[in-house]
Amino acid sequence: MSLWPYVRPDDAATERMHERCVRALNPEALRNEIRAAIGAGELDPAFPSGGLAASPVAIKKDRFTVYVEAADADGQRLEVVAKGYWDDERAARVLANHRRLWETDLGRGEGTIRTSRPYGLLAPLGVTLTERVPGEHPRPDDVNAAERAARAAALLHSCGADVEPLFELDAALANVERHARLLERRAAAIAARAQALAKHARSLESRFEDAPRSPLNGDFSLGSLLLDGERTYLIDWDIACSFDAAWDVGNYLVQLFRTAREDGQDPTASREAFLAEYRAAAATDASFEERVRFHEALVAIHKTYTVVRIGAADAEPLASGLLDLAAARLAELG
């Protein structure tokens, strides 16, 4: 999670999550949960429970994903993403935000940009059920995809959804500082530089703390999008919140930089296309441009720890590149 500090589940929570995943993969158990959720008003009453088939996709320390197929009375198949959490409150919040976003032009509209349909919650499993949409994640060197990503981000930020929670800049800075400290255990020289950059960023806090709020994805990146023909889908609302829209833009640009470096590609053209299209769609001003640079710096410092922790073969040069990016953006701000 890019905004909040990671909350590690304890042993009991991890065991509970694994038990939930097993139940979500069991068609009979899943059918019973679906029917109970419909009866409790927590799931779309038209959601089918016949012909269920489930397959695992991923299981992480704090959540899991299962693909589910169901058949209605006429034999029509419905493909669904079941995402489960050890934290019941988080599951409910993710679904509530997804529903609020769906109720805007991201769900109601007839345009080419939309989100997946949220069907409901299986509370005993901590599972959200959402439409499985088609498409592929864009490549970092795809300029047209970068323009589509920018238009999708601009629509999200202007959609008016009242997503929660309200996030504060102080918390983002504190998380960046924490990640810079954590680097000490893995790469002392990189840690020292990251901490100096985090200190510089903290000195600019008062300049950016009163930015207007918008509904955000929270971790907007290539993975937040699926492209299917002319349609662009916005997905993954795990850390949606209300915060400065410049965070999403900065996060996208840093993740674009990181992915392109990992793939041996040059992100310059995609970066420029994304920014130009976002400026046109959202009518940004000089203040917004400065906030994007600031949040790019924060995300780059944060992702430095991620890169080092994962420990890929090219971790050190990529970490140095991310800190170079952070330093350049902060220098531009003075």
Image (cartoon, rainbow, N blue to C red):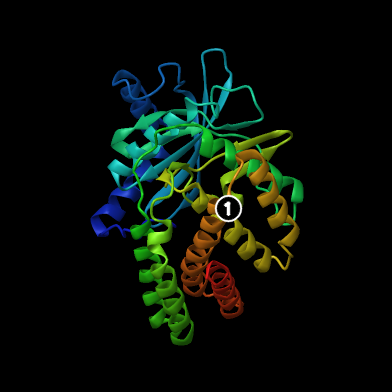
Of residue 142 and residue 262, the one placed in the foreground of this image is 142
Q: Quadrant of residue 60?
A: bottom left
- The quarter of the rendered structure image containing the N terminus is bottom left
> Is residue 136 among what the camera can see?
no
| Residue 319 percent location from the top left of the image | 55, 75
Q: Quadrant of residue 191?
A: bottom left
Of residue 289 and residue 186, the one placed in the foreground of this image is 289
From the image, tell me which residue sits under label 1: 286
Q: What element carries label 1?
A: helix
165 over 253 or under it: above or below: above
| Residue 117 percent location from the top left of the image | 51, 28
Of residue 131 and residue 152, the one placed in the foreground of this image is 152
> Is residue 111 among what the camera can see?
yes
Residue at the spot 53% in from the left edge and 53% down from the top edge: 287
| Residue 87 percent location from the top left of the image | 30, 46
Residue at the spot 71% in from the left edge and 55% down from the top edge: 272
Q: Residues within 10 Å of mark 1 (few under 14, many from 20)?
A: few
| Residue 201 percent location from the top left of the image | 44, 69
295 over 248 or under it: above or below: below
Residue at the spot 50% in from the left edge and 71% down from the top edge: 304
Residue at the spot 73% in from the left edge and 62% down from the top edge: 268
Q: Which amino acid does label 1 sit on?
A: Ala
Give the side of residue 317 with respect to residue 27, left or right.
Answer: right
The residue lying furthest to the bottom in this view is: 189
132 over 18 or under it: above or below: above
